[in-house]
Image (cartoon, rainbow, N blue to C red):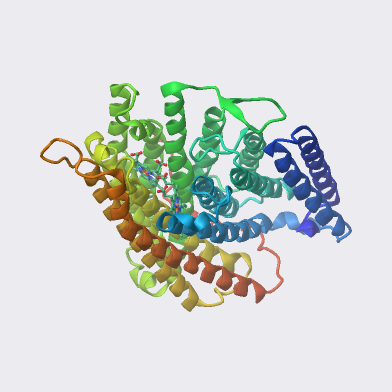
Amino acid sequence: MVGQLTTHERQLALVILTVLAVVGLLTLIVGRGDPLGAQGVLVLLMALGGIFFVISRYFEPEPGADRLERYYDEPCKIGILLAMGWAVFGLFIGDWVAWLLVYPDLTFDAGWSSFGRLRPVHTTSVIFGFGGNALIATSFYVMQRTSRARLPDQLSPLFVLFGYNVFCVLAVTGYMMGITQSREYAEPEWYADLWLVVVWVTYFIVYLRTLARRREPHIYVSNWYYMAFILVVAMLHIVNNLAVPVSLAHAKSYSLFSGVQDAMTEWWYGHNAVAFFLTSGFLGMMYYYLPKRAGRPIFSYRMSIISFWGIVFLYMWAGSHHLHYTALPQWVQTLGMTFSIMLLVPSWASAGNALLTLNGAWHKVRDDATLRFMMVAAVFYGLTTFEGSFLAIRSVNSLSHYTDWTVGHVHAGALGWVAMITFGAIYASVPWLWKCEKMYSARLVEVHFWLALAGTVVYVIAMWNSGIIQGLMWRTYNDAGTLAYSFVDSLVAMRPYYAMRAFGGLLFLIGAVVGCYNIWMTIRAAPATKAEPVADRTDPVVAATPVLAPAE
Ligand code: HEM
Ligand code: HEM
């Protein structure tokens, strides 16, 4: 990795790491007596580890000038490995949390392992650790290929990748120490948030600089989706995390918002995180890897663009469906509900576009588990968005809200859509990146596929059942007009479903471990070759797009 950096870049890396080490040291000093001090120790250790790593390889030969003629795939490779590492960790914690709901004593009497702390460890690890690393890695890959341009330099993409993982580590370890802002999906405190702003702005700049250097006149649709993901996540992150720390020596901060404005800001963020992190970025992935693997042009390129603008415009207004029957004005709730229903149109346009792209390639779907991962992802994307639009209807939400139905919806999207499209993209990318003909074992990809599908179906069916039973039990009255069931009655009724969900999660986790083994064995046997030269001809996926010329 260091061997790919020029001497100047190695020096710059040492400067950045030294600044980080100093920041860690200062945080440790001023924050002693507060959990912030422990986070300082972590930053210091990570920075020192980085310094040691760079120095130990400092005198390796510099890369030749011919590097500029080749794609720069190092960050893509590392990103994929990190994504798989976070997947196994995050799924393991998810399954632990699931068993915890069946056997509440699984905390072993420790604070760090309580449900309230492990739950955000799970959500952050899978969404940001697994999903985020996969998005960064594939966005770098796709942008280079579809633009026929190399990343602008060697250091900044690595800074984005490692900086982002420093954020994830700070977040996850912070929760276990009890540090949290208590804003769902935005739990990390102010100092980690500030760091993420630096990293994320760099990411956007790297993206724009590469696009500016493109040799392909057309900006392929995947790049639009990835760009919306980067830009909107920056906007959401900054606004939702506006806060004042108690002092520079404390981890705790207070939000700038209060009351119902606070709730609205949080769910404007929360739902758009679903839209731009869990949807837009992964659609970018789908629009490149699915046609590429199927060897078919996108069924309708125009529809993919219309769907892009539909999603960008409509999602922004849908967040208030999380706040039905609250102090939020009724008209704002109705606005969120209406836009959520309209969202079905662009969402199904993308799901349908993906499935229609497979026309003429269904025999490949039958034989190739990698393509089948992507096909199933498109099906679950269609299912989840239909369910979401339905749950957003106020009267339906009065039954589903606070119940496991929401958790079922989330995981139909998370496992069926996000994880499946990611595994498909990773299985497609690994042989391309490491220059092997194929994965070590196609049979193990098949095993992973069936474990993942079985795990998802078991998980989602368990949660649909438990959610609807919960909702109905909570609103059943007896003849005397009082509630027929106590809350504890509903908990007892949930137990078999919680066990079923935990079992489904276990299957999903085992599948991911099988995937890691298969990837590792593929890489081990890979020849030590350089990345391919920047193409002098348009990527076939881009070449298949109709020429979009302005009207005369
Ligand atoms: C048309 C698209 C979609 C709509 C209209 C929609 C709508 C909804 C609604 C109404 C809720 C429940 C709110 C509540 O009762 O608290 C919800 C929750 C959620 N949805 Fe969707 N959804 C959509 C697509 C997706 C997709 C593709 C994912 C991807 C994983 C997803 C992830 C989530 C998550 C994570 C939550 C839980 C939020 C929480 O923590 O409470 N949604 N969605
Ligand atoms: C082994 C697979 C998994 C298992 C067993 C699992 C388990 C769980 C459990 C037990 C919860 C807490 C539910 C509650 O509070 O009642 C949860 C929440 C959540 N998980 Fe997972 N999970 C898995 C995979 C994933 C993946 C891959 C993602 C995202 C890519 C994900 C995203 C989420 C989200 C967003 C929530 C919050 C849901 C909400 O607030 O409604 N999970 N998960």
Looking at the picture, does residue 412 appear above or below residue 453?
A: above
Q: x%, y% of residue 112?
A: 58, 49
Q: x%, y% of residue 115?
A: 49, 49
Quarter of the image holding residue 399?
Answer: top left
Quadrant that contains the N terminus: bottom right
Residue 219 in sight in this render: no
Q: Is residue 375 left or right of residue 44?
A: left
Q: x%, y% of residue 345?
A: 29, 42
Q: Taking the image as four quarters, which one is ligand 1 found in?
A: top left
Q: Which residue: 70% across, 35% down?
A: 34
Q: Is residue 375 left or right of residue 439?
A: left
Q: Which residue: 55% across, 56% down?
A: 108
Looking at the picture, does residue 293 appear above or below residue 179?
A: below
109 or 196: nearer the viewer: 109
Quarter of the image holding residue 416?
Answer: bottom left
Q: Residue furthest right?
A: 59
Q: Which residue: 66% across, 40% down?
A: 199
